[in-house]
Image: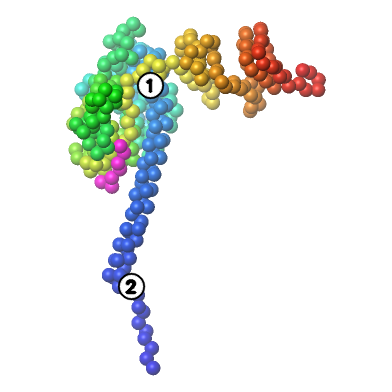
Amino acid sequence: MRISTKNHGFTLVEMAIIIMILGLLLAPFFRYLSTQQTKQETLESEGSNEVISAALATYLAEHNRYPCPADLSLAIEDNGFGAEERNTPTEIGNCDTSNIALSSNIYYGALPIQTLKLPSSYAANKYNWKYMYAVSQSLADADSLGSGGTDVFNGVGNITVRIDIDEDGIAGEAGDDNIDLDGDGLDDNTHEATNVHFVVINPGKDGKGSTNLSGINNAFGCAITAGDRENCDFEVGGGNPDIFDDKKPQPHDNINAANHFDDFIIYQMIRKEDTFWKVDPSVSSSQVNINMRGDGNIGIGTATPQVKVHVRSGDVKIRSGGGNSGTLNVNNLNADQTVHAEDDIDGGEMSGAGEGFFYCDATSC
């Protein structure tokens, strides 16, 4: 009797076939994960964008100019980290170009979070690459503005943002104009935004053109072939310093590929209605005051508020919590429906078409 001692396994050809099949099966899964990651980063970036835009709007309303960029080379523990680079600490003085770039009438550096009163978490993205900030020179220099100078809200910026409307990876081309935005039957110029005041750049995972929170330059260069080159070409002093690109994020394994783009950018001309509210974070480390700048009324559910706070078809609730009581102080309280109070109601006059309910204990009411 013969007993075979040979072990029968897979041949190299069979292993190659199995690996190929597994690759085909898993490829859609990895593409799905990559897509979901990009969507999540987009949502996170949109949240940060709103906070940064509001901070810039508030600063503009208070100072009638945009802040200068901050020094990209400073580490988070350095003095002056996140502070604007200005020749003087007062309102008079141009941006100091000793530590920031100036080209094509545009200042370029880090987002000045300290000047904008933003927490340090807004200094960099989730990969610890600093947000970069470009601003039109004429809208940041104070010498030409002064207290009674140009209305910067209506000023003309020097920045152009090319937009990839059709999401083909190429921004600012003729194909991006084939959209009728105003409904007049004609295609509108949607391929670029001109006269933009400022741009804030989240450099994505590759961080090109930026530095980390230790002030160390990114090791990746701003290659001439890269799809995100226009957003970091201040780094190399080439390209078009006044042009930035807004495309759909399409990360690529080769970060210098023409179809690679992992940036998120903010660009707009601040509107006055963005600045109706003033946030004062100096109350305490955990509290802020939110004040209305104007002397008008606030309407919730109505476009024509008749009193300071006018709520239509809804409730206003003030409740105690965390050891603190909630109090409503008014001169006159008028209610069409029911007023409920768990504690005291103090007012000069109270009237209503509905009922009033007061919660009493055993000793007082």
**What residue sits right under mark 2 in the picture?**
10
Q: Is mark 2 on a helix, strand or loop?
A: loop
Q: Where is residue 89 in the image (x, y as percent from the top left)?
A: 36, 15
Determine the residue positioned at 20% across, 22% down: 104
In the picture of the structure, the residue carrying the numbered disc 1 is 56
Residue closest to the far bottom: 1
Chosen colour scheme = rainbow
* Residue 327 found in image quarter: top right
**Residue 125 lies in the magenta-colored region:** no
Q: Report the magenta residues as a range.
A: 248-254
Q: Where is residue 220 in the image (x, y as percent from the top left)?
A: 26, 41
Question: Considering only order in the chain, which callout, 1 or 2, is on the residue closer to the N terminus?
Answer: 2
Asked whether 14 or 146 is in front, the reply is 14
| Mark identifier at residue 173 | none
User: Is 186 on the left or on the right of 35, as rendered?
Assistant: left
Circle 2 Cα neighbour tier, 10 Å, few/some/many (<14 / 14–19 / ≥20): few
Residue 247 at x, y = what percent?
28, 35
Residue at 35% x, 27% y: name it. Answer: 111
The quarter of the rendered structure image containing the N terminus is: bottom left
Amino acid beneath label 2: Phe
> Which structural element holds mark 1?
helix
Q: Which of marks 2 and 1 is in front?
A: 2
